[in-house]
């Protein structure tokens, strides 16, 4: 069930991105949400690793790098948009 939820959320993000492609300001709240949850995910993973409740694996490292790159990228794009 979790995979269905995740797939539907990301498909919704993609469809809204396509719908608002000609008007990026309409997509800004969604992009802001994405940047925030990705940054929080990275912080929570670091906390779990520090507390010893999570462990490193190749999957964890790759996923962390991907999420961090998107969080930083979102921040850079939207900080220049002001």
Image (spheres, rainbow, N blue to C red):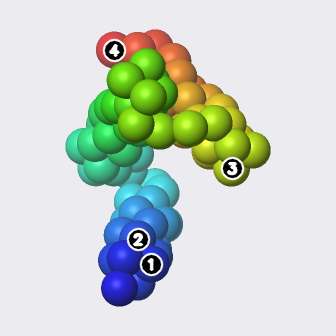
Q: Nearer the viewer, residue 68 or 16?
A: 68
| Left or right: 16 in relation to 62 | left
Q: Position of residue 13 (x, y in %)?
A: 40, 63
The relative height of residue 65 versus residue 16 in the rendered view (above or below) is above
Mark 4, secondary structure of its residue: loop
1 or 4: mark nearer the eye: 1
Image marks 4 and 3: residues in contact by CB distance under 8 Å: no
Q: Which residue is mark 3?
A: 59
Image marks 2 and 1: residues in contact by CB distance under 8 Å: yes
Q: CA distance from mark 3 to mark 1?
A: 16 Å
- Count neighbours of disc 1 (C-alpha within 10 A) and say few if under 14, some if 14 to 19, many if 20 or more: few
Q: Which residue is mark 1?
A: 3
Q: Position of residue 24 (x, y in %)?
A: 40, 45
The relative height of residue 54 versus residue 81 in the rendered view (above or below) is below
Mark 1, secondary structure of its residue: helix
Mark 2, secondary structure of its residue: helix
- Whichever of labels 1 and 4 marks the residue nearer the N terminus, that label is 1
The relative height of residue 55 versus residue 75 in the rendered view (above or below) is below
Is residue 78 at least partly visible in the picture? no
Q: CA distance from mark 1 to mark 4?
A: 36 Å
x 40%, y 36%: residue: 53
The relative height of residue 76 versus residue 30 in the rendered view (above or below) is above
- Whichever of labels 4 and 3 marks the residue nearer the N terminus, that label is 3
Image marks 1 and 4: residues in contact by CB distance under 8 Å: no
- Count neighbours of disc 3 (C-alpha within 10 A) and say few if under 14, some if 14 to 19, many if 20 or more: few
Name the quadrant containing residue 35. Answer: top left
Q: Nearer the viewer, residue 47 or 73?
A: 47
4 or 3: mark nearer the eye: 3
Q: CA distance from mark 2 to mark 1?
A: 5 Å
Q: Which residue is mark 4?
A: 82
């Amino acid at each position: 069930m979790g995979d269905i939820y995740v797939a539907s959320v990301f498909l919704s993000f993609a469809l809204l991105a396509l719908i608002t492609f000609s008007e990026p300001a309409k997509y800004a709240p969604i992009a802001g949400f994405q940047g925030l949850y990705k940054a929080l995910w990275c912080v929570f993973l670091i906390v779990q690793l520090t507390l010893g409740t999570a462990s490193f694996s190749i999957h964890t490292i790759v996923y962390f790098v991907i999420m961090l790159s998107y969080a930083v990228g979102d921040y850079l794009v939207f900080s220049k948009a002001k």
